[in-house]
Image (cartoon, rainbow, N blue to C red):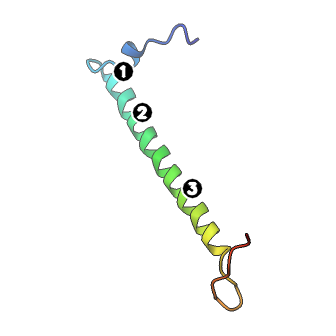
Amino acid sequence: MADNFKFEEAFNSQTLRGRANVAKATWASVGLIYMFVKLHRRSAKRREERLYCRSCLMKMHPKL
């Protein structure tokens, strides 16, 4: 199947189908970047929460 894929035909700027494929690829890349940013922020927030004592809300020293 990879032998039949032609990049020039799939993303041809002269055809309506090619322009639609470019738009779809653009939206997909924007969505992936958004998801990576959201996942990175979530993991950073979780790492920060581990440094605080839940009952007293004081910052704890990380274990070395």
**x then y, percent, for residue 58:** 64, 88
- State the residue position of label 3: 39
Mark 3 vs 2, N-terminal side:
2
> Which of the 4 image quarters holds residue 64?
bottom right
- State the residue position of label 1: 11
Is the residue under label 2 in contact with that under label 3 (CB below 8 Å)?
no
Q: In which quarter of the image is the N terminus?
A: top right
Three-letter amino acid code at the position of disc 3: Leu
- Whole-Å distance between the Cαs marked 3 and 2? 21 Å
Q: Which residue is drawn at 41% across and 40% down?
A: 27
Between marks 3 and 2 in the image, the one whose residue lies nearer the viewer: 3
For disc 1, the neighbor class at 10 Å (few under 14, some 14 to 19, many from 20) is some
Which disc number belongs to residue 25? 2
For disc 2, the neighbor class at 10 Å (few under 14, some 14 to 19, many from 20) is few
Between marks 3 and 1 in the image, the one whose residue lies nearer the viewer: 3
The vertical placement of 40 against 20, above or below, is below
Three-letter amino acid code at the position of disc 2: Ala
The vertical placement of 55 against 49, above or below, is below
Helix, strand or loop for disc 1: loop
**x then y, percent, for residue 60:** 67, 82
Q: Residue at x 63, y 83 (%)?
A: 59
Which disc number belongs to residue 45? none
Three-letter amino acid code at the position of disc 1: Phe
Most extreme residue toward the left, as rendered?
14
Is the residue under label 1 in contact with that under label 2 (CB below 8 Å)?
yes
Mark 2 vs 1, N-terminal side:
1
- Whole-Å distance between the Cαs marked 3 and 1? 30 Å
- Whole-Å distance between the Cαs marked 2 and 1? 9 Å
Side of 4 relative to 18 (left or right): right
Side of 7 relative to 60 (left or right): left
Q: Residue at x 68, y 92 (%)?
A: 56
For disc 3, the neighbor class at 10 Å (few under 14, some 14 to 19, many from 20) is few
